[in-house]
Amino acid sequence: MTIEYKNDPKLGNEALNALWAAAWSSPSRRDFQPILSRSLGHVGAFAGTSLVGFINIAWDGGIHAFILDTCVDPAFRRRGIASALVERAKNLARERGAEWLHVDFEPHLGSFYRKCGFAPTEAGLIRLRD
């Protein structure tokens, strides 16, 4: 099946929550609209009309952008979709004026993001809510 990538597709909460439930095993529903309205951009991967992958590009309003929420439906993994989403996000962020693209990830994803061109850096994280 052919995968089509779209920059800034109109995505409703239903489609995003369905992808989240599949990709993250997270049944809790969220309202994504406030997030998308403040993003520098986002990219969706579609199999027909079904959303099967997503990446969000947050930003600081200046030169720093951050990719968040990279996810692919488990039924579509190992097909290069996540790599294509990251590549499109890099290009979109560059086109929209970002000079730096950051990503935080769990240790098991280190080799994936290095293959996508990210250099390792030190970072810090603090949980604000349980």
Image (spheres, grey):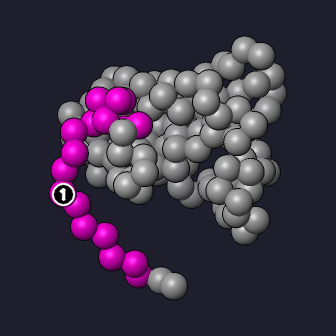
Q: Quadrant of residue 86?
A: top left
Q: Which residues are magenta?
A: 112-128
Q: Position of residue 111 (x, y in %)?
A: 36, 39
The reply, left or right, for residue 5 in relation to residue 128 is right
Say which quadrant the N terminus sits in: top right
Residue 39: tell me if it is visible: no
Q: Position of residue 21 (x, y in %)?
A: 74, 56
The rendered magenta stretch, by its main secondary structure, is classed as loop
The reply, left or right, for residue 47 in relation to residue 30 is right
- Between 112 and 24, the one nearer to me in the picture: 112
Task: From this view, report whether residue 120 is shown above or below residue 125.
Answer: above
Q: SS class of the residue under badge 1? A: loop
Q: Is residue 46 magenta?
A: no
Q: Position of residue 67 (x, y in %)?
A: 41, 44
The reply, left or right, for residue 77 in relation to residue 39 is right
Number of dots carrying numbers: 1
Q: Furthest-top residue in view? A: 2
Task: From this view, report whether residue 26 is shown above or below residue 22.
Answer: below
Q: Furthest-bottom residue in view? A: 130
Q: Amino acid at mark 1?
A: Glu
Task: From this view, report whether residue 79 is shown above or below residue 128.
Answer: above
Tell me if mark 1 has few (under 14), some (14-19) or many (20+) residues whose alpha carbon lies within 10 angstroms of its own.
Answer: few
The reply, left or right, for residue 20 in relation to residue 48 is left
Residue at screen point 53% across, 55% down: 35
Residue at screen point 36% across, 30% down: 116
Residue at screen point 70% across, 32% down: 76
Q: Which residue is mark 1?
A: 122
Residue 69: tell me if it is visible: yes
Residue at screen point 41% across, 81% down: 128
Q: Is residue 121 magenta?
A: yes
